[in-house]
Amino acid sequence: MDYYDSDFARRKMEPMYWFNKSSEMRNSAGALWFSLSNTEQVSEWLKSNCNIQSGADYSVFDMLCGLSLELIYKAVIVSKKQPPPDNTHELNKLRVRAGIDASKKEIAILDIYTHSIYWQAKYPVAKKSEHHRNYVKLVDDNLYESIPGLNPKIRKPNNAMGWELFYKLWADGAESFEKANPNLFG
């Protein structure tokens, strides 16, 4: 095994590398979340209109959150001396493998984040119609609610996704990581 293969194998099984990448994604998601509340200053700094009304920045925020959660779950898995799963971004499968509990609501939100990683934040449409259908149903069922006294088809956002819920999910993963690596956190 040459140096590059050895370095690759070491990095793949080093939990702190996975944790640090997760933290970097979390911090980037936080910076984007902050910018969504300060669009005028950000637009001026970027010398570009941030066009928040398009929702594009929110989908990128969701993708960064999802990637951060993917990496924190993989950090926990690697901490258990298991190889990180290849070729999956399915957050609930990773969460279960990492041994982290979640509520029904959190499971649904993790599925939305999974769609954001695979396609929703990167492409205008999913590869398959069924993926688009599943995503729209998840969003409708979990991010909107009926307005009492009005037609049930008239719904409003419930603000279920945002920094607070993401950070709670990330902190649950970080707590599991710390428990699996007590020597790293004195």
Image (tube, rainbow, N blue to C red):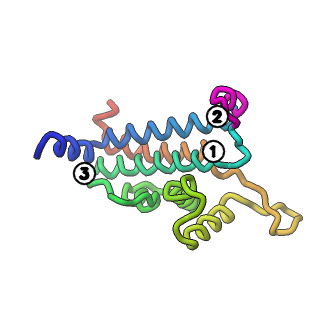
- Label for residue 81? 3
Queried whether the magenta region covers residue 41, the answer comes back as yes
Task: Check the image and name the residue furthest to the front.
Answer: 47
Position of residue 147 measured from the top left corner of the image (x, y, whole percent): 83, 61
Residue span colored magenta: 39-49
- Please give left or right for residue 135 compared with residue 67 in the image: right
- Looking at the rendered structure, the secondary structure element under dot 3 is loop
Hey, what amino acid is under mark 2? Ser
- Looking at the rendered structure, the secondary structure element under dot 2 is helix
Task: Check the image and name the residue furthest to the right.
Answer: 149
Residue 103 appears in the picture as rendered: no
Residue under label 1, please give it: 57
Q: How many marks?
A: 3
Nearer-N-terminus badge (2/1): 2
Q: Decide: marks 2, 1 in contact (CB < 8 A)?
A: yes
Distance CA(mark 3)–CA(mark 2): 38 Å
Distance CA(mark 1)–CA(mark 3): 36 Å
Hey, what amino acid is under mark 3? Lys
- Looking at the rendered structure, the secondary structure element under dot 1 is helix
Position of residue 38 measured from the top left corner of the image (x, y, whole percent): 69, 32
Q: Decide: marks 3, 2 in contact (CB < 8 A)?
A: no
Hey, what amino acid is under mark 1? Asp
Frontmost of labels 1 and 3 is: 1
